[in-house]
Image: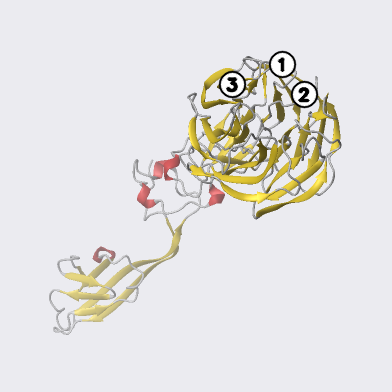
Amino acid sequence: MAYLGKGLKSISTANITVDKMTGNGSTTTMGISLGNQISGSVNDINVYISGVQQRPGTDYTLSGSTITFTTAPANGWPVVAISKGDSIKDDVIDSSVTSESIKDGAVTDAKITSVTASKLTGALPALDGSALTGIVAYTKSASNPTISTNPAGGLGTVWVNQSSGQVYVCTDATAGANIWTNIGGGSGNVEPFSFPGSNFGYASGGIHGGSSTQNVIEKYSFTSQANAVDTGGNLVPGLQHHSSHRSETHAYHGGGDQTTNNIQKFSFASGGDAVDSGSTLSTNRSRIAGASSGTHGYALSGTEFPAFTYFAAAEKFSYASAGAASFVGNMTQARGRPAGHSSGTHGYASGGDLGSSKTNVIDRVSFASDDNATDHGDLSEARACRGSGGSSTTHGYTVGGDLANNNSTVIDKWAFASNTIATDWGDFHTAARSGSTTSATDAIYFAGGRAAGTTDINQIQKWSLASGGTAADWADITLNRYGLVGNHY
């Protein structure tokens, strides 16, 4: 049965007191000694006048510790007040509250003011997280985020890969080009492909001694000034005047003067000989402008070999799967020996050979959709620029080239963001053509090439992106040659 009694608070003391007075016919009040201990109810006081019990609330009232009579007790009449008062503690007796003690529905949300953390033990029921605070939202998935994973939470969103255990946080919330930084125990960030490299430049293949096709792959450091070293791997077969493309992990080289349409690749990380990628160009050709997105290599224009007819088409091949290159669209001009460049969204071909003349046109091809190239602007002078294309994240650099068998000394710089006329940005340390250009995050490098007449050089020249000017003599490749190509990572 339910609890019966005064209530569930602990009683410190329980007292009954008797107060007396003698009426005088005029006094209507009487003080009691337990006034501060009683509940405040007039019903807790029993009053007797000349032995007759008075009616509480009618014959007398109570206010604090004072009784007030409706009619003053007559002169000489004895008045007796019996008070019942308890001293109460302000807490509940241990184990006194049971489920039977509480009326159904009596404990409302308003009556629960707080719950200490020590009381939150055991299994909790499913909770509605919308009212929780101090919780960092995160996404769980069986795969990694991608650059096009646009988080609703924006910057700072956390992504947990439940398959690998790797954790990423969005550090750049740019729609379609987000950067997810790996903050777990793994490695590798998820970010848009950036064409420039930060570690090494590569010089591959070429012609030595005027006719000897080379298969050597060598590399040089972007961070310390030292001569190039042979990686120990070779192109198979050797190539000259071939195309150059790069993914995040591999260098790709296609075509060349060896009557081939094969595309071979080698690993940046492990080195070794190049292997057949399984992909092919649509036709045998050389002197191609190579461009690279994060997923495809682009072969722009070039010379069909051995007929030396000029090619207008742009085509692409996949890094992820082998197969024949697919048609993208036509360039604005059929030409050979253009320079290739890459931004985050487009491939470019600058300059080139039209047969009886040279061109200064800069063409642009979109990575996002297959379509014909558009005219993006002009170089400061018309010239054939095979192997002479450099790229930063914002600009293309056309490094020298061939002016009717005379070497151009002009280094042109032009913006990816807008159609423009290129500006003269710097000068060669040693004027050369048909060398290999590589793009670092802070500099452009030009290795080897053909200097005045038929003199081939092994010099590596460097221009700082910050200042341009005259190139520095940075280092040397292992062998004098021209018709080689560059790559980087």
* Relative height, residue 194 to residue 7 (above, below): above
Q: Are marks 2 and 1 in contact (CB under 8 Å)?
A: yes
Per the model, the C-alpha gap separating discs 2 and 1 is 10 Å
- Quadrant for the C terminus, please: top right
Name the residue carrying label 3.
311
Q: Nearer the viewer, residue 484 or 408?
A: 408
Per the model, the C-alpha gap separating discs 3 and 1 is 15 Å
Q: Nearer the viewer, residue 50 or 220?
A: 220
Relative image position of residue 279 (x, y in whole percent): 67, 17
Name the residue carrying label 2.
239
Q: Nearer the viewer, residue 381 or 190?
A: 381
Relative image position of residue 6 (x, y in whole percent): 36, 56
Nearest-to-viewer mark from 3 and 1:
3
Dot 2 falls on a residue whose secondary structure is: loop
Nearest-to-viewer mark from 2 and 3:
3
Q: Amino acid at mark 3?
A: Phe
Dot 3 falls on a residue whose secondary structure is: strand
Relative image position of residue 361 (x, y in whole percent): 53, 35
In the picture, residue 194 is in which quadrant?
top right
Name the residue carrying label 1.
260
Dot 1 falls on a residue whose secondary structure is: loop
Q: On the rendered structure, is 11 left or right of 147? A: left
Tell which circle, 2 or 3, labels the residue nearer the N-terminal end.
Answer: 2
* Relative height, residue 477 to residue 61 (above, below): above
**Residue 403 seen anywhere in this rendered image of the structure:** yes
* Relative height, residue 17 to residue 201 (above, below): below
Q: Amino acid at mark 2?
A: Leu
Picture residue at 44% right of the left edge, 48% below the top: 97
Q: Nearer the viewer, residue 63 or 51?
A: 63
